[in-house]
Image (spheres, rainbow, N blue to C red):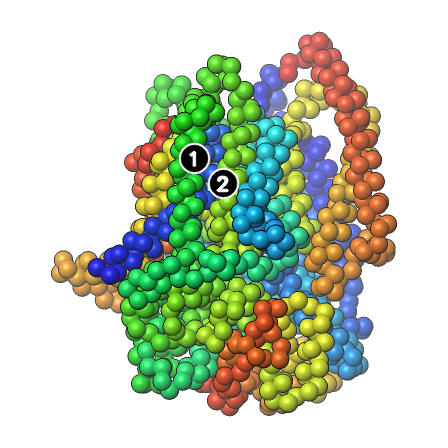
Amino acid sequence: MRQLKRLICLLLAGVLTLWTGIGTVGAQQGTIKVMYTDPLSGPFAQVGDQNLQQFKYILDYINGRGGAVGRKFELVSFDNKSQPSEALLALKSATDQNMPVIMQCSGSNIAAALIEGVDKHNERNPNNRIVYVNCGAVATELTNEKCSYWHFRMDAHVGMKAETMVRALPKDVTKVYLLNQDYLFGQSVQHDVKAFLAKLRPDVKVVGDELIPLGKVKDFSPYITKIKAAGAQALLTGNWGPDMTLLIKSGMDSGLDIRYYTMYAHLGGGATAIGPAGNGKVRSVMAFHENIAVETGKTDTEGWTKQFRSSHDFDFYAAGFRTIFEFLQAAMNKAGSADPVKFAAALEGLTITDMLGHQVTMRKADHQILSEYFVGVFSKGVKYDSEKTGLGWKTETTVLPKDLDQPNTCNMKRPS
Amino acid sequence: MEVLLVSLLNGLVYGMLLFMLASGLTLIFSMMGVLNFAHASMYMLGAYFAYSVSRVIGFWPALVLAPILCGALGALIEMYALRRVHRNGHIAELLFTVGLAFIIEKGVQMAWGLLAVPYRVPPVLDRALFHIYGSNFHAYRGFMLLISVLMFVAIWLLLTRTRIGLVIQAALTHPEMVGALGHNVPRVFTIVFAGGSVLAGLAGVIGGNYLVTEPSMAATMGPIVFVVVVFGGLGSLAGCFIASLIMGLVQTFAVVVDVSFADLLARLGIQVTASTPLAEVLTIPLPRVGALLPYLMLILVLLIKPRGLMGTRDT
Amino acid sequence: MSSGAIGTAARPVAAPGPGGLLRRQWPWLAALAVAVVVPWVAFDWSTGRHSGFAVSMLSQIGIMIVFALSYNMLMGQAGLLSFGHAVFLGLGGYVTAHVITASKNGVPLPLELTPLVGGLGGLAFAVVLGYFATKQRATAFAMITLGIGELVTSCALMFKTFFGGEGGVSTNRMTGHSLFGLAYAAPIQVYYLIVAWTALSVVAMLLLTRTPLGRMANACRDNFERAQFVGYDPAMVRFFQFALSGAFAGIAGALYTLTYEIVTYDTVAGPLSANALLMTYIGGVGVFAGPVVGAVLIVLLQSWVSLLSNSWLVYAGVLFILMVTFAPMGLTGLVMMHQPIWRSGRMGRLVGPYLRLLVPGLLVVMGFVLVVELCSFLTIGAAQGKSLTLGKLTVDPRSAAPWLVAGALLVGGGAWLRLAARSFAAAWHAVTEHVKAAGAQA
């Protein structure tokens, strides 16, 4: 027993030496390393997996156009297993290797941990700073109460998505039902949608307002009964995963004649789960879908996304991630360096033209991106279908960046 | 009245779905005392097998083939692995099934990919069966109801009218005595485990296209099925049936009853405002916590009756 | 250092006093020395700083050691299987986070004493929840803890005032109050604080096993009916053991807060409770130091192996299955089986058989890993743009060669292993016979 314990401890020591010997090679020259952390194993593995595939394609394009400051981008992935403590470990690994950027797309609880972690690290280690690029954690508070100079959010937050959803409601819809997941994100959707309804569509009446425990409801038929009894014409929900697909399936099975407004139906697996029965009924708030380029005549963008389709079996829903790297490219080139302190200063306030021809800005006050947003409806007769179902997304409403320039409460502490 | 009838129907269907899943687990749990964490994984495999088979032959042959495949897999697992672990105690068996669940989940991810697969309801059942107060009652839900009732009747007849069934019943409560009487108890164990897997697979075939077929479906269905089984009690199939129905009805009715503690207190004359301590807890309406009620009920029942509602034996 | 489950040999009375203490407890002291020295092994001399990754991982090991030991107070010592133990770690962490934030704004609590706060928080919640849970035992107890775990997790998501919602509760450990005047900006300082508190907790829990409560808990585990005749109410014994176990889990939670400075709902959720079970069981429930070994192994597996492969869950699953089938007493239990042989000085006879077992064993492991990685790459990894590399060698999963190699390793290695295992079993049998014959007590 004693010998074995000793052996284990010695092994541990030896192994760590070996590892750190390999790992601590400074990355000053060579590629610009970006640490990317998301779930790559366990129940949410497909999130990280699909993002990685899309990032690979995007980086091939960006590096093909010279990368930034004469160097190519390189993505280093780290599985955070949906746990904030693992994401913080990713941060430590990134700073050990002097990486300039850490990127994360899924989970506002992980994003909150990373914002705090990055802030404290940068404060305590002024010679080894790092920038946190948030590619999808959408809780509004991350750029309001919890905002930070080193955090840049590259996706519309809940407030902006809620406004987009409300703007997409047609004039003849006057009764809506809200159903959301009972945690911070769902509660924010509920709160923001009601606020924007009151502001933009005072004629609309909220006939029902539900919160459901996250991931626990398997049978949505009682909720459908209530929705029908309330006489709602549209169902507005921020649900994701089975909470969304089961809700929609249940509604369609019971023949409910209603419009579904969601935030996540366009992500991987959504189209498959909804199926052809959702034709003309299901809508989703999204940054991009493959038919926008067709509708607006952007043939080079269409060609680029078409090539992705030919070698992958899911939609290129995250093509908009290309804008992230175009921002990084522009900021680093403007600052002339990949040093976090320099390019962060160049990144805030920057405006570029994205691949759909819109002017996109990184707002200086709270480091929130201002870009266009769309509401697409799942329908037949579009050029590019989703996940081989024969139906695809068609743009119903476009909201311009300037319309989403919402007030913020960020009290940003800038480094001196 | 309308709400009552519709909710009754909804609760019944949901309860029977739970029973389909829980029946196999209660057999295994009652017989072997093994909390089989891989039961929900068998359910997932049943759905995936049915998806693959139905793409080649069709849904109806898949309804028969997929559960048989699951049963065969269950028999193999029991004969070559679980039997060895049995002598190491209940915790060892539990951990074994946990490890098995990990491996099956990863195996499914590697074989069918990480996304949901398009396993759909067969077109002949994809319509409204009848109309009730303006909304449809989907034919597939009726089919689910039918299969689960048939399942219950079949298991009941098997356990009470056949010889092997009587042996299993006896072994459910007194395994050592049955062994002493000369029955091949290990073989009975294998039959029960395989049978439980068949039931889980069948539940997967039926439930997989009604719900979503994806690699995380085992992890999401697992906990509630355990709650139902333990609530119903060890050694009792009728207990499991009643527990499923109760859970289904409670969860369904909780959604339509819009009451909170604050409302009850208001009737007693106490007003709850934003500054009252625990206001956040008191103002929660029942629908918000509906899906949590099974856990609460489980705790309450176990405190009073540690064997569960109709349990006949301890582990 | 067994807690009575595996037969204690009658030993010569150990020498009293500090010299005797050193001789008896040298493995623990050696482990402590290693814990103090190891971060310096991972020190990067070129940049003059510690490897943040290594220090974080070591801190995590310290936290998990305390957590797993507290879990073993229930499982190994009292025979209570709990599915909701993470609740007390998480709640202790939340309490600590709130207190640290409060201490910045007035209360002059030194940071070194904050784990006490976590411990008190864990104790309080364990008393309240334990009152209900410990009314029952065995399966009913396990299911009640499952229900409690699910309920607390859902509450942590729903209520914002105490739990902070999805974003959790964050705090800053640089409160300015310290007994030693340290600022705790550098993670290495927090690490040494964790080492100190881990050592304290280990000593406390070890001493607890020798109290009447600890012994009664063992008795209730071994023979529930007989233990009642001693005179103590088993429900009270369970209750006290549960409460103390929750207190130590709360200390682990406080250490978590100090390391990560943020507590989110996953610290009370099921997966962390399952982790405790795995760590304790794989390390060995019958030996006090078992959970320590298990914690080290599982943290390494989760944080380090997962860097090398996305299939680490498969390896974890296979490891569990092998352990429960062939070694239910855990790793330390396996080692303890060698104790009588060691004592009679016949270990040397097993070295040869072990070596003969090692080579085919390694081959089988390599073959298995290769198969899993190949499968994973074919279906998942290739699309992600990664390539399968073993050191300098790039392997193409589409060609037949790697598959043939893997197959040969598995099949050939497996056959060789069976032969070697048979001869090893014979050697073991022979040695134990010798030991018994020589009169050394087993």
Give the residue type at disc 2. Answer: Leu
In the rendered image, which quarter is residue A266 located in? Answer: bottom right
Secondary element at tag 1: helix
Residue contact between numbered discs 1 and 2, judged by CB atoms under 8 Å: yes
The residue beneath circle 2 is B199
Q: Quarter holding the C terminus of chain C?
A: top right
The image position of residue C46, as x and y in percent, is: 78, 63
Residue closer to the observer: A39 or B59: B59
Count numbered badges in the picture. Answer: 2
The outermost residue toward the front is B124
Residue at 62% from the left image edge and 77% from the top image edge:
A384
The secondary element bearing badge 2 is classed as: helix
Name which residue lies at 84% across and 51% down. C400
| Crowd tier of the residue under label 1, counting other residues whose Cα lies within 10 Å: few below 14, some 14–19, many 20 or above | some
Residue holding disc 1: B155
Q: CA distance from mark 1 to mark 2?
A: 10 Å
Rendered location of residue B59, percent (x, y): 55, 52
